[in-house]
Image (cartoon, rainbow, N blue to C red):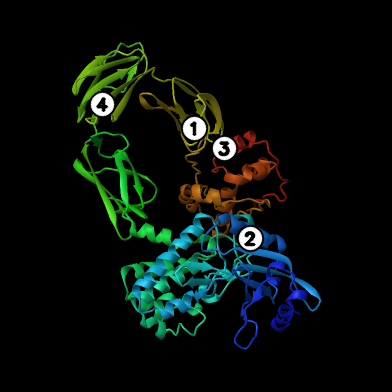
Amino acid sequence: MLTIPNIITSVENKNSLVLDEHAKNGIFARNEKGQLKKHSGGFSVVFPYETTEGEKWAFRCWHGNVGISRKRYQTISEAIKNANLSFLCQFQYIDKGICVDGIIYPTTRMRWIDGLTIKNYICQNKESKDLLVGLANNFLEMCKTMHSKSLAHGDLQHGNILVDKNHKLFLVDYDSFYCPELKGEADTVTGLVDYQHPSRSKNKYTSEKIDYFSELIIYLSILAIAENPTLVDKYKVENADRLLFCKEDYTDLKASAIYKDISALSSKCKLLLDILEEYLNKTTLDELEPFDVLYAKRTTKPQIVSFECASKKAKVCVGQKILFKWETKDATQVFFNDKLVSGNFFEWTEKNVGINKYVLKASNGFAEDTRVLTLEAVRPASISLRTSSKVIHSNSKENVVISWDVKDAQKVFLDYGYISEEVSAQGKETFTPNETTTYTILAIGHDTTTTSTKSIEVVVAEEAQIMFDVNPKYAFRGTPVVLSWSVRHAKKVVLEGHGEQEFTGEKDICFDKDRAFTLTIRDAFGEKKKTVEITEIPLPQIKCISIPTPVYNINIKIKMPHVYIDAQRFKNKIQPKLSNSISNAKLSNNLLDRFREQLYKHVYDSLPQIKNLENVFGNVNHYQVPSLRLEFIDLFKHYYKKINSARKQVRKSVKVTK
């Protein structure tokens, strides 16, 4: 395993173990004790040496694994050489640079810079505002130059930025250097955390944006100390491995002490602090923009290059959509009539009649530019259009009068058929149309382009013809009947109770409750109805049965046939008519009740079930009951002859004794 002592041993024996010929031929610097001078940090150690020509270089060896790739360092070396930037030192990767414990390792060599780290320079010159402001300006120019070439250092922090005696800046340590040829490579060296965005530790791929956050932290720290030197001692910068900000501040920036201190400084520092806050609201490095670009957007006064109504008209109609277009520069926000809008156009619907102002304001949060447009809004044309009749009969030569009244119009036209004629704002005309015709009033508004139209249709049509019948017209309740119809020139046919129907059809229905049926027809003239009625045929009815009361002075015993009947129906209807005559008979109560009961039963429902009426009533005549009216017996026989249903055998006979 590589260690710094092992590396020092190999450098002490440079003639045999240092394989980089340039370094081997150089003279390594030593301290007053004769020991090799070295500068260690991170994953490497650097030994300064001087060539025979007097040039100072740095021989750099790694003692930790940083994923060293020969191809990567050759790419970086070539990119730095091609960039030819004064603050980037000459750099070369040596694949076989040193032998340590019998193993050959790569090294790099870089021009040595005599100077201070930027942190030490700041601390030594904290009381010189001019020097620190000059340092900040040089640092900003260096950042802009790197951006212009899509380059990034990758580990921008105080230890990798040197300031020489001429106050010039230099970047050293290019392990995490980025150039466009390395796009898509893994971001392995993430730098000191106090200089890095919180998302840097999760960043997968290296890019030109990896320095944006570090650049702002360094630039803002320099300006803040230039304005308030006491911040160096307050935050113990000289002995810390950072400047003014630490990683804990990034968790809740507004709650940090440094935020409060910088907020009390100049507007420029406060603006940079706002940009830092904006940075911390981003979740990835890819979302960041260079702080100098953001600062320029906020400090350069925005400009409205153009602002116009797309239609280029001096007058517009109320209720009409108006398209406004504009072009701005250096604006982060645009307001149309005090409403924040995006893009470079906006549609506005005017509601007020008269002269209206439209205000466009471009702002970047610090300055703004304003433009005003003035347009006159007029009322749109209003049209009243009437006709004396909307529907007329065909072949009738009927006249219709079309009248109109138009307001707020520059011109008015009447269109019908293939004819268009200019007319006055108010007027009327008479027409005799032979076919359905649409009459349209077209009005051009005072803005000269907006048109309004209103139409009315005069329908020329034939009146509906209806045939509606029922067969048969006379029927018993419960019997079927057929409704039939045929309709011409109709739009809709509806049979009451059965919904919409075809124009020709028929329907079988049962004549039960309704005697009248209605067919409703809708045509161009409105709604018509036609009704057919069915005459009901009544059934025969027995209105009255009169039975004289027999008078006997004899005892009568009647043995009645055993039948299964329902006498209740007869009893309810006939009993009141028979009760008086029967009750006058001088019969015993028992006989009278039995006789009345049998009479009730036989007259109504038992008749179809009795096989031989003679067996019941013939014996009555035989045993001399003369006052029992023969008409009553004939009535029974009359009904018997008309009923041919099944009968039951009389089980018992009637016996009459004295």
For disc 3, the neighbor class at 10 Å (few under 14, some 14 to 19, many from 20) is: few
Which of these two is toward me, 412 or 212? 212
Residue type, label 1: Glu
Does residue 33 appear anywhere in the picture?
A: yes
Q: Position of residue 649 (x, y in %)?
A: 73, 46
Does residue 179 appear anywhere in the picture?
A: no
Which mark, by number, is residue 443? 4
Q: CA distance from mark 3 to mark 1?
A: 54 Å
The residue labelled by disc 2 is 77
The residue labelled by disc 3 is 635
The answer to which quarter of the image holds residue 135 is bottom left
Secondary structure found at label 2: helix
Q: CA distance from mark 1 to mark 2?
A: 92 Å
Of labels 2 and 4, earlier in sequence is 2
Residue placed furthest toward the right? 102
Instruction: State which mark lies toward you, 1 or 2.
Output: 2
Residue type, label 4: Ala
The residue labelled by disc 1 is 500
Image side of residue 583 versus residue 619, left or right? left
